[in-house]
Image: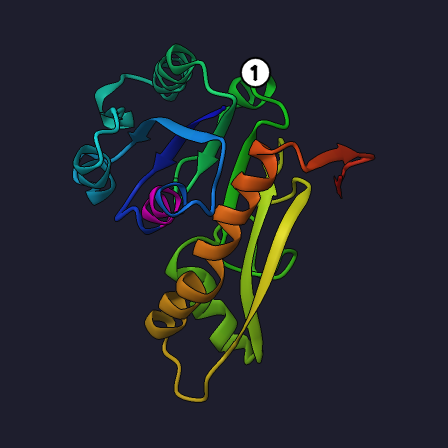
Amino acid sequence: MLKIVVLVSGGGTNLQAIIDGIQDGLITNTEIAGVISNNKKAYALERAAQNGIKNICISPRDYDSRAGFDEELLRTINRFQPDLIVLAGFLVVISPAMIAAYQNRIINIHPSLIPAFCGTGYYGLKVHEAALERGVKIVGATVHFVDEGTDTGPIILQKAVAVAPLDTPETLQRRVMEEAEWKILARAINLIANEKLSIKDGKVIFE
């Protein structure tokens, strides 16, 4: 049984996709041990509570230093003893110590087709604003392992989404979530839970 901890900052739609995926049998051999948010007002915490999942807020604002926050976040995650950490809209940079402790055991969902519109400064609605400003016709989402860089870890899955002529950043964001993010995040977790992939020479290999 794959034990996962989900880290979130906002509404938790990707968290909900994981919860639904487990309930619907799209994600097998998996349980959510806990949900952690850096934002006390994140609706994701309520989603977790409604589904009987332990949920905790660890806010950087409650600590005198970023190092103190990083240490407490890692301590809390360690208490859950997870097999996998899922960054599902977590808008905090992961510390090197956490990456080292959970090497190849942290995955992230990013709302673009990496390497397009990724890296420092590209998150949330900003990704879709940049895509529309550039005039691209195809966008999408990527699930990848987390390494020391920003959106640079081995890619697990990607799914493309067409840009509509009248799209706004908001409508495009919603469609990318519905058509790509929610689907490939669930699929990636299921692949990991059932040992269907591995990493070789910095790339994901499917078994």
Left or right? Give the position of 165 relative to 153. Answer: left
* x and y, in percent, of residue 72 in the image: 35, 14
**With respect to residue 121, does 55 lie above or below?**
above
The residue at 51%/20% (across/down) is 98
Amino acid type indicated by mark 1: Ala
Q: Which residue is mark 1?
A: 101
* x and y, in percent, of residue 149 in the image: 62, 37
What stretch of residues is rendered in magenta?
Answer: 14-20
- Given residues 184 and 31, the one toward you in this image is 31
Density class for disc 1 (Cα within 10 Å; few <14, some 14-19, many ≥20) is few
* x and y, in percent, of residue 174 in the image: 36, 67
Secondary structure of the magenta portion, mostly?
helix
Residue 175 forms part of the magenta stretch: no
Left or right? Give the position of 54 relative to 88. Answer: left
Task: Give the structural element (helix, strand or loop) at label 1.
Answer: helix
- Name the quadrant containing residue 136: bottom right
**With respect to residue 111, does 91 lie above or below?**
above
